């Protein structure tokens, strides 16, 4: 296991689930709609509120499929020049930068799970010794901001091949030292611009930006690119993600 | 809703086909949801730091409840609404525009716009004297606004796709310079549509027959010409207080393309025109 990060206690989650269910029953619609103009919806009963929520999520699932259809594995994201690069990269997490808990690179191991031939954990040195790829691409956040960054690391495809992963599996999932988690579709994972980034602008990636390794892909929104990764799992089971479980679209390709 | 007519003369006159009414109100619903959810999404990272939208006017849920549910104050809900209703906006818009163009109705109703007519009507409109007696015919200002708002909606679709897929549709994003350029255009297009809505809804409320026509499809004929004509006087309610005289002649003179006979008929609907009546978007 990683030095920092035991998985969150399921007991706590179950306790919360009851609370959440109560909130849902009381005010699910207010959870989704409060626009004054939609007054016609305020009479809806609880089952209608649930139906509305279910309908919106069903549309999000439909949008996942549309986006998978639109994705062209051979289309490359635009690249930029060194002059465009923002240094340091923009910090982003579900907490403030001063709350970052640095990962100890000496004891860190990259754990592997699921449909993978060789699940031997990787040390930082071994991961950093793999062939490096550099890209200068645009990072786009679901919130609407963006910046151009220069990222280096090993292609995820090469890494997956090296560990004997089943490339026909549906998902590649990531667990992070800050209790964040996420998953992406296999076609995006195999795209040449999807890398396990270990360096930014020629320097080792900093503590605040995902050290020792983060996912970097210009084909997905920023929240689809987990930082401080300590485990990778290849599977056919949907595992969602930190923000996705709160309603953000899972595919979130750009 | 009651029609403001004398019961005796009330013969039903078709104005908007079912196709036009259904696509109009579906589009209205799509636009309201897109703007409401779009404002919530915008508020997260405003394009202009000095402008955010009041939360009550946005769609995405009560921030406290959504925070408990989703660890987020409603942006994910707003995105769910936005990317669900974009399909209604897209499909309904394509059907409405395709149908209107193929049938030739939009061309007949919205074209031609003569420059002289436009100048005249803009002047009248700015002095609040622009007549709208026959709601089956559009004046030049209306034609220009309807064409303009359709173009704005097409720009919204293009800039929205450029924001949604800046890699897969990178040529489209490039047309808007870059990702932030597409966001800016998306904001400006929304502003244009919101301004249109303000004018459109205000005028519809001032001439309530248009709402009746867009909902039921028809209106009741006004009083015959030999009875006292009230509609033109009502229209001239929009006139400023300093120009109150002779409402009837004013209103009659304000019908730009009308024959003297049509002008004299005032609010009466000209049946041949009504038969081929299109819609007001």
Image: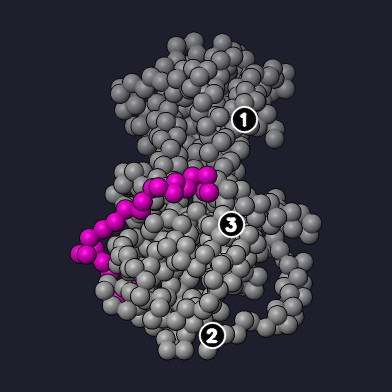
**Residue B252 drawn at (x, y percent):** 46, 20
Other-residue count near label 3 (Cα within 10 Å), few / some / many at <14 / 14–19 / ≥20: some
Give the answer, above or below, for where A99 lies relative to A163. Answer: below
Label 2 and label 3 in one chain: yes
Q: Nearer the viewer, residue B23 or B202?
A: B23
Task: Evaluate whether residue B189 shows in this view.
Answer: no
Q: Which residue is mark 2?
A: A2
Asked if labels 1 and 3 touch by Cβ distance under 8 angstroms, the answer is: no
Q: Do tags 3 and 1 sit on the same chain?
A: no
Q: Chain of mark 2?
A: A
Cα distance between the residues tagged 2 and 3:
26 Å
> Which residue is located at x 39 percent, y 51 percent?
B166
Find numbered disc 3 in the image and state the secondary structure of the residue it sits on.
loop
Q: Residue at x 45, y 39 (%)?
A: B153
Above or below, B261 against A87 in this view is above
In the foreground, B109 or B46: B46
* Label 1 SS: helix
The reply to whether the magenta stretch includes residue A82 is yes
Label 3 marks which chain's residue? A
Mark seen at residue B227: none
Question: Looking at the magenta stretch, what is its main secondary structure?
Answer: loop
| Residue A26 coordinates in the image, percent (x, y) | 76, 68
Mark linked to residue B21: 1
The crowding category of the residue bearing disc 2, from other C-alpha atoms within 10 Å (few below 14, some 14 to 19, many at least 20), is some
Q: Which residues are magenta?
A: A67-93
Q: Report the residue at 54% width, 40% height from top.
A: B89
- Residue at the disc numbered 3: A170
Q: Residue at x 55, y 45 (%)?
A: A66
């Amino acid at each position: 296991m990683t030095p920092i990060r035991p998985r969150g206690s399921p007991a706590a989650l179950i306790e919360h689930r009851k609370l959440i269910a109560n909130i849902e029953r009381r005010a699910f619609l207010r959870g989704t709609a409060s626009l004054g103009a939609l007054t016609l919806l305020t009479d809806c009963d609880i089952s209608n509120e649930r139906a509305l929520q279910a309908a919106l999520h069903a549309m999000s699932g439909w949008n996942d499929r549309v986006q998978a259809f639109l994705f062209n594995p051979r289309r490359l994201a635009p690249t930029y020049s060194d002059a465009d690069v923002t240094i340091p990269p923009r910090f982003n997490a579900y907490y403030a930068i001063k709350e970052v808990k640095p990962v100890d690179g000496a004891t860190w191991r990259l754990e592997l799970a699921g449909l993978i031939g060789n699940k031997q954990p990787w040390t930082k040195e071994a991961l950093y010794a793999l062939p490096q790829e550099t890209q200068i691409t645009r990072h786009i956040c679901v919130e609407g901001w963006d910046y151009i960054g220069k990222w280096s690391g090993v292609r995820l495809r090469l890494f997956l091949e090296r560990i004997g992963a089943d490339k026909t599996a549906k998902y590649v999932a990531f667990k992070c030292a800050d209790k964040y988690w996420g998953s992406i579709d296999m076609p995006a994972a195999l795209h040449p611009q999807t890398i396990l980034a270990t360096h930014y602008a020629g320097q080792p990636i900093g503590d605040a930006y995902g050290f020792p390794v983060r996912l970097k892909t210009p084909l997905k929104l920023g929240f689809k690119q987990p930082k401080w990764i300590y485990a990778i799992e290849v599977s056919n089971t949907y595992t969602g993600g930190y923000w996705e479980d709160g309603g953000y679209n899972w595919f979130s390709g750009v | 809703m009651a029609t403001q007519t004398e019961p005796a003369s009330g013969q039903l006159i078709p104005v908007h086909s079912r196709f036009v009414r259904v696509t109009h109100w579906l589009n209205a619903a799509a636009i309201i949801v897109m703007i409401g959810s779009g404002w919530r999404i915008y508020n997260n990272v405003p394009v202009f730091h000095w402008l955010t939208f009041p939360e009550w006017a946005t769609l995405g849920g009560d921030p406290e409840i959504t925070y408990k549910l989703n660890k987020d104050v409603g942006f994910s809900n707003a995105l769910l609404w936005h990317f669900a209703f974009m399909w209604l906006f897209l499909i309904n818009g394509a059907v409405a525009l395709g149908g209107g163009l193929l049938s030739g109705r939009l061309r007949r109703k919205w074209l031609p716009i003569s420059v002289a007519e436009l100048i005249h009507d803009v002047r009248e409109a700015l002095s609040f004297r622009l007549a709208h007696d026959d709601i089956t015919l559009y004046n030049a200002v209306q034609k220009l606004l309807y064409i303009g708002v359709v173009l704005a909606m097409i720009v919204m679709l293009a800039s929205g796709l450029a924001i949604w897929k800046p890699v897969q549709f990178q040529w489209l994003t490039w047309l808007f310079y870059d990702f932030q350029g597409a966001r800016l255009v998306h904001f400006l297009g929304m502003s244009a549509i919101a301004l249109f809505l303000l004018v459109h809804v205000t005028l519809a409320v001032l001439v309530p027959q248009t709402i009746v026509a867009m909902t039921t499809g028809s209106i009741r004929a006004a009083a015959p010409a030999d009875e006292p004509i009230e509609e033109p006087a009502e229209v001239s309610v929009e006139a400023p207080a300093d120009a109150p005289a002779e409402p009837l002649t004013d209103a009659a003179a304000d019908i730009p393309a009308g024959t003297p006979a049509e002008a004299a008929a005032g609010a009466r609907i000209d049946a041949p025109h009504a038969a081929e009546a299109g819609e007001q978007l």
